[in-house]
Image: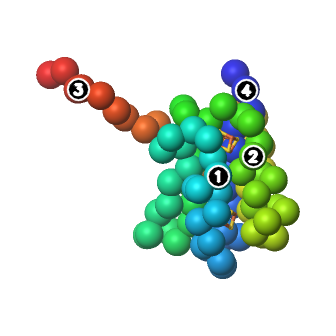
Amino acid sequence: MYYVAHVDKNICSQTSCHLCTTFCPETNCINYSEQDKSAYISVDRCKSCEICVYICREVAKNNAIQMKWINDLEDGFMIKKSGLVLR
Ligand code: SF4
Ligand code: SF4
């Protein structure tokens, strides 16, 4: 197991700048929820590079993203499903 990025929705939703979704090098890894007004991580795609942590803290000045041990994610984690689903 490993560390993954985790967005604090309460902090992110106060600005919702979308910057991290632009800078994450992994496709479809950070997405944006219009319902929550917050970015969120598809943790199965996160490569733990911490670029989003830097962007949110130093550029967005919001500090809404922390690296967390994957087993310690409080609300579980979201798996992005892609490709064919066989029935
Ligand atoms: S950079 Fe930070 S504040 Fe901006 S959308 Fe991402 S998590 Fe939210
Ligand atoms: S740690 Fe890297 S790969 Fe993971 S969400 Fe942040 S920018 Fe994307």
Mark 1 vs ligand 2: CB below 8 Å = yes
Q: Of tags 3 and 2, which is closer to the observer? A: 2
Q: Say if 70 sits above or below 75 in the image.
A: above
Label ID, residue 51: 2
Cα separation between marks 4 and 2: 16 Å
As measured in the structure, the alpha-carbon distance from the residue carrying label 4 to the one carrying label 1 is 21 Å
- Residue positioned 52% across, 72% down in the render: 37
- Give 57 or 2, whichever is nearer the viewer: 57
Instruction: Mark 1 vs mark 3: give the one in front.
Output: 1
Say the numbered circle drawn on residue 70: none
- Is 17 located above or below residue 26 in the figure? below
Circle 2 sits in a helix, a strand or a loop, which is it?
A: helix
Q: Which residue is mark 1?
A: 23
Q: Which comes sooner in the sequence, label 1 or label 3?
A: 1
Mark 4 burial class by Cα count in 10 Å: few <14, some 14-19, many 20+: few
Which x, y percent locates residue 28?
48, 44
Q: Quadrant of the C terminus?
A: top left
Q: Earlier in the sequence, mark 4 or mark 1?
A: 4
Q: Give yes or no for contact between labels 1 and 2 (Cβ–Cβ under 8 Å).
A: yes
What residue is disc 4 on?
Answer: 2
Tell me if mark 1 has few (under 14), some (14-19) or many (20+) residues whose alpha carbon lies within 10 angstroms of its own. few
Q: Find disc 3 in the rendering and name its residue.
A: 85
Q: Tell which circle, 4 or 2, labels the residue nearer the N-terminal end.
A: 4
Q: What distance separates the C-alpha of mark 1 from that of mark 2?
A: 7 Å
